[in-house]
Image (cartoon, rainbow, N blue to C red):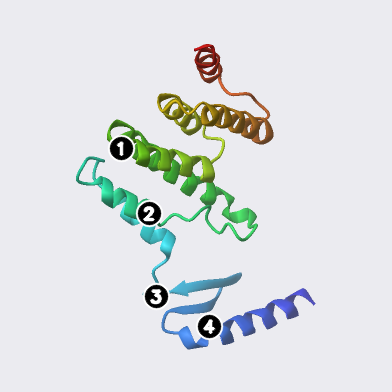
């Protein structure tokens, strides 16, 4: 019965893909099926390639970095719960995170508004990134925005407890305690 359902499914997939036969085909393989593509651009592959070709971040390249990074909309295949995609999701997320932190750190030197934007975006996409929360806490402290410092510390503490079962590292806790005393 399973084989019959598989063959029926493959038949319907082939019928659906028929208008695109010059670009996408399902072919029989030795012990299964293979999806072949020709002249097809995958957004994730395009993004990885563009990211890899970027030179070092500086005043002249930062705009291009932000353009490429804005293409990232969240985890790879996030709307599906595919176990096989988890490794790729993690790898792509870490690649995005590394570059996003570089951008945020670059902006920290000369554009505090953009730095806040990027650190906030990091906290949105990878909430357990302590470095981004801590940077936001310091920015808010610099701006004398006491409520935001408290809120950011509480958010970080909550995320780390829920996601990882741990507290912020001692550097963050000590900084927060010292800041509160002031």
Measure the C-alpha gap from mark 1 to mark 3.
43 Å
State which tag comes first along the sequence, 1 or 3: 3
Image-based side of 117 in relation to 178, left or right: left
Residue receiving disc 3: 38
What's the residue at 53%, 78% (across, down)? 27
Marks 4 and 3 close (CB-CB < 8 Å): no
The residue tagged with tag 4: helix, strand or loop?
Answer: helix
* Mark 4 crowdedness (10 Å alpha carbons): few <14, some 14-19, many ≥20: some
Q: Is residue 144 above or below residue 13?
A: above
Between the residue at mark 1 and the residue at mark 4, the CA separation in whole angstroms equals 48 Å
Left or right: 76 in relation to 114: right
Q: 30 or 181, which lies in front? A: 181
Measured as percent of width and height from the top left, residue 163 is found at: 65, 36
Q: State which tag comes first along the sequence, 2 or 3.
A: 3
Mark 3 lies on a secondary structure that is loop
Front: mark 1 or 4: 1
Marks 1/2: CA–CA distance? 26 Å
Of the numbered discs 4 and 3, the one sitting upstream in the chain is 4
23 in relation to 84, above or below = below
Label 2 crowd (10 A; few <14 / some 14-19 / many >=20): some
Is 47 positioned to the left or the right of 16 in the image?
A: left
Q: Which residue is mark 4?
A: 17
Q: Please name the residue that numbered disc 1 is placed on.
A: 111
Residue 2 image position (x, y, % from top left) = 76, 74
Total numbered circles: 4
Residue at the image point whose x is 65% and y is 26% from the top: 166
Front-most of residues 85 and 146: 146
Q: Is residue 39 positioned above or below 47 on the image?
A: below
């Amino acid at each position: 019965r399973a084989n019959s359902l598989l063959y029926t499914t493959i038949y319907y997939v082939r019928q659906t893909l028929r208008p695109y036969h010059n670009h996408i085909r399902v072919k029989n393989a030795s012990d299964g099926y293979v999806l072949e593509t020709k002249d097809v651009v995958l957004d994730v592959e395009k993004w990885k390639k563009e990211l890899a070709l970027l030179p070092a971040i500086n005043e002249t390249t930062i705009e291009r970095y932000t353009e490429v990074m804005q293409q990232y909309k969240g985890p790879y295949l996030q709307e599906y719960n595919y176990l096989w995609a988890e490794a790729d999701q993690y790898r792509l997320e870490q690649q995005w995170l590394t570059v996003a932190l570089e951008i945020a750190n670059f902006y920290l030197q000369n554009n505090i508004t953009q730095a806040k934007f990027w650190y906030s975006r990091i906290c949105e996409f990878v909430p357990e990134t302590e470095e981004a929360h801590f940077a936001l806490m310091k920015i808010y402290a610099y701006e004398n925005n006491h409520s935001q410092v408290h809120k950011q510390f509480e958010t970080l503490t909550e995320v780390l407890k829920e996601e990882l079962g741990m507290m912020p590292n001692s550097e963050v806790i000590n900084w927060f305690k010292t800041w509160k005393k002031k």
